[in-house]
Image (cartoon, coloured by chain):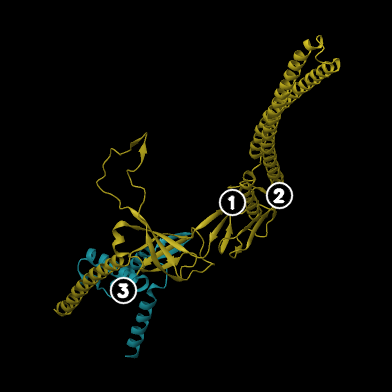
Amino acid sequence: MTRRTLIFASTICLLCTGCGRAPSVDIIGSFFPVWMVCLTIAIVLACIVRLVLLRYKFESEIGPVALFYPALVILFSCLLWLIFFR
Amino acid sequence: MDQETQSTPRKRLGRWILIGVVVAAAFTLLLSIYQVDLHPRTDDANVWANYIEIAPEVSGRLVELPIKDNDFVKKGGLLFVIDPRPYEYALQQALADQELLEQQIIDENRKIAAQNSAVDAAGAALHVSRTGIQTASSSIDLAKAAVTRAQAASAAAEARLKYATNDLNRIQPLLQKQYVTVDQVDQANTAVRIAQGNYDESQAALLQSQASLNQAILQHEQAGNTAVESQARLGQAVHTVDRVETLLAQRPAKAAKVDSARLDLERTRVLAPFDAYVTNMNISEGAYARPGAPIFTLIDSRNWYVVANYRESKLKNIHLGSHVDVYVMGHPDRKFGGHVESIGYGVFPEDGSVAGGLPNIERTLNWVHLSARFPVRIHIDDPDPNLFRIGATAVTVVR
C-alpha cells in the first residue's frame, strides 16, 4: 500500500513539474522539439517491451504486432509528453 | 490439452492487452491533440526589446565617452559629450547680438526724441511766420493810412498854392496904377513860393508813403512765403522722424537665435533617454559626430518582449492578456511568465508584390496552402537581465 502511495505521489509530482521545462531540447547546438525525443524514447521502450514479451514467450498471444507496437509507441510517447511537457 | 487450457486465458489476456493499448494510445493521442490546440505553442519565437539608434543633433568631435559597449546606463546618464566650444562661442555671439540690438534701440529712441524736438521747433517757426504775416498786414494798413494822409496834405497844399497864385495874379496888375505897394506884391510872391514849396513837399511825402505801402505789401508777400516754407519744413521734420518699430521687430528673432544657440549647446551633452543597454558601439573619444548619423544603439531595458509567430489557425485561442509560459533557450529549465500584449495585424501577403507598377500574381496554383503566421507580441512580466537578449531563441506556450 505504501509503495502504491509512493508511486502515486511521484506521478503527481511529475505531473505538477510537467511544464517546468522548455518544450525544446538542445542537442549539440540544435533545438529539437520534445515530441521527437518522446518518440525516440517510446521506440526504445517498445523495444524493451518486445524483449520482455519474447523473454516470457508472450508476443504470439498479443495478436497482430503491426497494430500492437505502433499503438504502444504512440501510447508511450503521448504519455511521456503529457506527463513531462504538457 | 493442458497446453490448450493454459493458452486460452493467456490468449484472452493478450487480446485484452492489445485492446487496452490501442484504446489508451487513441485516448492519449486525442488528449495530446486537444492540449496542443487549447494551449498553442511555438518554438519560432525571439526575445525582443525596443531599441533606438543614438544620433547626435550637432556635429563635432567627441571629447567625453564614459560608456563602453554592452554597458548598462540609467535614464539621464551621460552617453557622450561633443566638443562644446563652438556652441559656447555661438551662444556668446547671439547674446552679444541681442545686447547690441538693445543698445541700438536706446540710441534710436534718443534720436527720435531729438527729431521730435525738431518737429516742435518747426511748428514754432511756422507760428512765428504766421505772426509775421499779421504784422505785415498791419504795416500795409498803416502805410495806406499814411498815403491817404499825404494825399490830403498834398490837396491842402495845392489849394493853398492856387489861392496864393490867384492872389498874386490879382494884385500884380494893380501895382502899375499904384493901388498896391511893391511890398504887398513881394509878400504875395513869397506866399506863392512858400505854397509851391509846401506843395512840392507834400507831393514828396505822398510818394514816400506810397513807396512805404509798396514795401509793406512786399513784406506781406515775403511773410506769406516764409510761412509756406516753414510749413514745408514742419512736414519734412514730421516725416523724417525715425521709427523704432523696425528695431523692436528684430527682438524676437534675436531671442530665438539665443535660444537656438543655447539648445545647440545643450545638445552637445547627450543623455540616455531611458534605462538601457549600450550595443553596437565601436568608437572612442575623438570620433567625429555628424547630425543624424547613428553612433551606437540603445536597447530599452524597461520592457522585454517575446515575439512569437503563431499560425493563423491558432490565433482563435490566443486572447489579449492571456498568460503565456515563456522559455528562453539560454536556460531551458526556467519558466518566465508573460501575457499577450498584441497580435500582429499584418504580414506581407504571398501575392502582394508589385512589379513594374502591376500586381505580381503567380501563375501556378497550389492545391495545398501553408497557413500564414502572425507575430504575437508577448510582454514578459519577470525578465531576467542575464538571459534576455534581443534575438535569443524562445519557446512560448499560451495558457
Percent of width and height locating residue B229: 67, 32
Q: Which chain is yellow?
A: B
Q: Residue at x 27, y 66 (%)?
A: B33
Read off the residue under disc 2. B106
B21 relative to B361, above or below = below
Residue under disc 3 on the same chain as residue under disc 2? no
Q: What type is the residue that disc 3 sits on?
A: Val
Q: Quadrant of residue B64?
A: bottom right
Read off the residue under disc 1. B55
Q: CA distance from mark 3 to mark 2?
A: 112 Å
Q: Which residue is situated farthest in the left direction here?
A: B1
**Dot 2 or dot 1, earlier in sequence:** 1
Percent of width and height locating residue B130: 66, 37
Q: CA distance from mark 3 to mark 1?
A: 71 Å
Q: Between B42 and B360, which is closer to the camera in this rendering?
A: B360
Dot 2, how many residues are within 10 Å of its Cα: few (below 14), some (14-19), or many (20+)?
Answer: few
